[in-house]
């Protein structure tokens, strides 16, 4: 059973925005001597033991040394570091540094807008450019950040070397026999042990949502905002809802796009996500079959079987690629799932499956590399390690083998295009079952008083964060629900005028937003 995160696909849109900036005024650096917001009341209410963190001064400068994933080159963003305690219960102990970025407001500034792409584990620095040239970018300094342990923030979460990551991806982990399960769990134990040894259990214990939302409040204060403006995508909606729960009186405006329901059972969440990917695959297959020579054939009823016929041989014989690694079964599945995040990738996916039918796997391997954070030179970002580290402390792990087996069968039933036919009713425990530190959170519905209006955006055909999760989150927060009819993961600032105009109006005056909208 594979859990797919939502934040990784967001980087595709960000890269497109960065490429489009060029030398336009919308992407120009701030004017020299631009007055910084005054902190003043922004730090009021902070505990005395945390005052030095809430009142620190930022030293903005070029982002060259912050670029861990190749998305900041050539941008005009400014970057800085924010000191926070590793353990908020021990503020006099070790400190961490949170990397932040800024695209200054190009017009009449209302304040800062903190943004996060999700993941968990995705770098958010390049996302600061997502609103350039828009009404939102004119009114707000858009501020991205790498959550603690992620990207340019330190100390970094580190589990595997580049070579070890390549070796991990080469394993298919689909054998559900007792021997196969034992072998998979062996590797997962080793992975958890490597994370503890290379990152440190003291750091791993404090990389979850509970600690990140406190970092967000420090960032809010040092930016000079008395109340937070926030835009979070996918897992970033969990950060937003958790912040709203802990600091409701410090929220001014909050847009949560591609919602994660904090009250949902994690197993149910994964199964519903599988159903979402099946829905997206069905839509892709229908679109593919409108063209000539679709690699899935011309019968929608046979699309699932035809797909498995294409990828099944990779279990024992990887497809040839110009890269010496070849394309194995696991990477083929990862590449396909990456492409199902957005219809903009359906063309490359169709081409990749066509090439696979002819015996070559370069296109799907490139898509898998995008998901896994692997650069052309073979180096990896720490997105996968951070993803595991955060989710393993955010929720209690499944340690009941009967539940693990049942979950695997439910996953196969929900997404038959991903069912390799090897289900036995048994399955390996997830890596979180072997984690070195206990979880710091658990599923629960949010009930909070005094929260200003929040906008939740949910897409009807979202593969990674199904629509109903957004409906449920909007209900819990008592906020506006904006429904977008489409098949993609997240939509705000993706060029859909109806959505972007509603988001801009909301950010300008949160209280004026109607209870329901549809685009």
Image: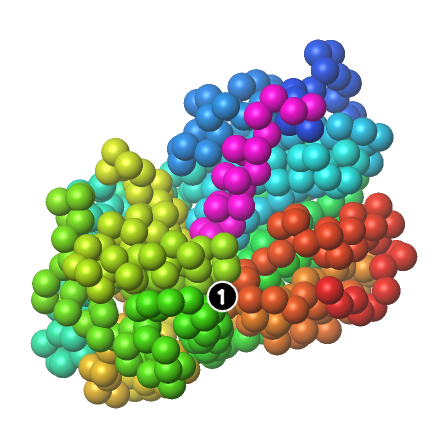
How far across and how far down the image is residue 240, in percent?
Answer: 64, 55
Could you tell me which quadrant the N terminus lies in?
bottom left
Query: In the visual, does 111 lie left or right of 265?
Result: right
Residue 385 in sight in this render: no
On-image quarter of the C terminus: bottom right
Q: Is residue 23 covered in magenta?
A: yes
For the question of whether residue 290 can be seen, the reply is: yes
Q: Main secondary structure of the magenta part?
A: helix
Color scheme of the displayed model: rainbow
**Residue located beneath label 1 in the image:** 464
Q: How many marks?
A: 1
Residue 401 percent coordinates (x, y): 28, 82
Indicate left or right for 510 with 482 as reference. Answer: right
Q: Indicate the quadrant where residue 512 lies.
A: bottom right
Judge from the rendering whether residue 191 lies leftward or rightward of residue 503; answer left or right: left
Foreground of the two, 264 or 87: 264
**Which region of the structure is painted magenta?**
1-25
Kindly give the residue lying farthest to the right in the view shown. 512
Disc 1 secondary structure class:
loop
Q: Is residue 325 left or right of residue 231?
A: left
Neighbours of disc 1 within 10 Å: few (<14), some (14-19), many (20+)? many
Residue shown at the point (66%, 58%) measured from the top left: 256
Q: Position of residue 387 (x, y in %)?
A: 40, 54
Residue at 52%, 40% (x, y): give it. Answer: 16
* Residue farthest toward the front in the current orientation of the protein: 292
- List x then y, in percent, for residue 46: 71, 40
Q: Is residue 105 above or below residue 383?
A: above
């Amino acid at each position: 059973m594979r859990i797919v995160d939502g934040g990784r696909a967001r980087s595709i849109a960000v890269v497109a925005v960065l490429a489009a900036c060029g030398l336009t005024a919308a992407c120009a650096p701030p004017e020299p001597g631009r007055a910084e917001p005054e902190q003043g009341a922004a730090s009021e209410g902070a505990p005395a033991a945390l005052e030095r963190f809430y009142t620190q001064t930022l030293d903005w400068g070029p982002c060259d040394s912050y670029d861990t994933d190749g998305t900041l080159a050539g941008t005009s963003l400014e970057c800085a570091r924010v000191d926070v305690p590793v353990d908020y219960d021990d503020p006099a102990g070790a400190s961490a540094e949170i990397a932040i970025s800024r695209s200054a407001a190009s017009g009449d500034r209302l304040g800062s807008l903190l943004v996060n792409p999700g993941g968990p584990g995705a770098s958010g620095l390049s996302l600061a450019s997502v609103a350039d040239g828009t009404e939102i970018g004119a009114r707000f300094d858009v501020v991205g950040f790498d959550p603690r342990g992620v990207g340019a923030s330190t100390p970094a979460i580190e589990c595997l070397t580049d070579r070890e990551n390549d070796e991990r991806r080469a394993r298919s982990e689909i054998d559900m026999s007792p021997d196969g399960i034992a072998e998979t769990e062996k590797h997962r134990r080793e992975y958890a042990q490597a994370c503890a040894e290379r990152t440190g259990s003291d750091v791993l214990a404090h990389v979850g949502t509970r600690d990140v939302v406190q970092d967000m409040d420090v960032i809010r204060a040092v930016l000079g905002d008395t109340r937070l403006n926030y835009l979070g995508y996918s897992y970033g909606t969990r950060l937003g809802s958790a912040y709203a729960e802990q600091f409701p009186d410090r929220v001014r405006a909050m847009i949560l796009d591609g919602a994660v329901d904090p009250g949902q059972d994690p197993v149910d969440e994964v199964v519903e996500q599988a159903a979402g990917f099946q829905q997206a695959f069905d839509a892709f297959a229908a679109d593919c079959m409108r063209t000539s020579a679709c690699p899935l054939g011309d019968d929608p009823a046979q699309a699932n079987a035809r797909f498995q016929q294409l990828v099944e041989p990779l279990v024992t014989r990887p497809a040839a690629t110009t890269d010496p690694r070849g394309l194995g079964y696991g990477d083929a599945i990862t590449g396909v799932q990456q492409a199902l995040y957005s219809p903009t990738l359906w063309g490359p996916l169709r081409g990749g499956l066509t090439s696979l039918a002819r015996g070559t796997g370069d296109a799907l391997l490139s898509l898998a590399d995008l998901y896994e954070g692997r650069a052309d030179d073979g180096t990896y970002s720490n997105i996968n390690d951070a993803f595991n580290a955060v989710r393993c402390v955010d929720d209690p792990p499944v340690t009941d083998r009967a539940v693990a087996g049942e979950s695997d069968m439910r996953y196969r039933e929900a997404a038959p295009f991903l069912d390799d036919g090897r289900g036995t009713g048994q399955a390996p425990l997830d890596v979180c079952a072997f984690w070195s530190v206990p979880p710091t959170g658990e599923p629960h519905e949010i009930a909070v008083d005094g929260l200003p209006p929040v906008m939740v955006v949910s897409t009807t055909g979202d593969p990674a964060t199904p629509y109903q999760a957004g409906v449920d989150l909007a209900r819990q927060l008592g906020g506006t629900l904006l429904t977008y009819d489409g098949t993609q993961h997240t939509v705000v600032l993706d060029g859909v005028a109806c959505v972007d105009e509603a988001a801009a109006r909301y950010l300008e005056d949160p209280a004026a937003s109607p209870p329901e909208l549809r685009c």
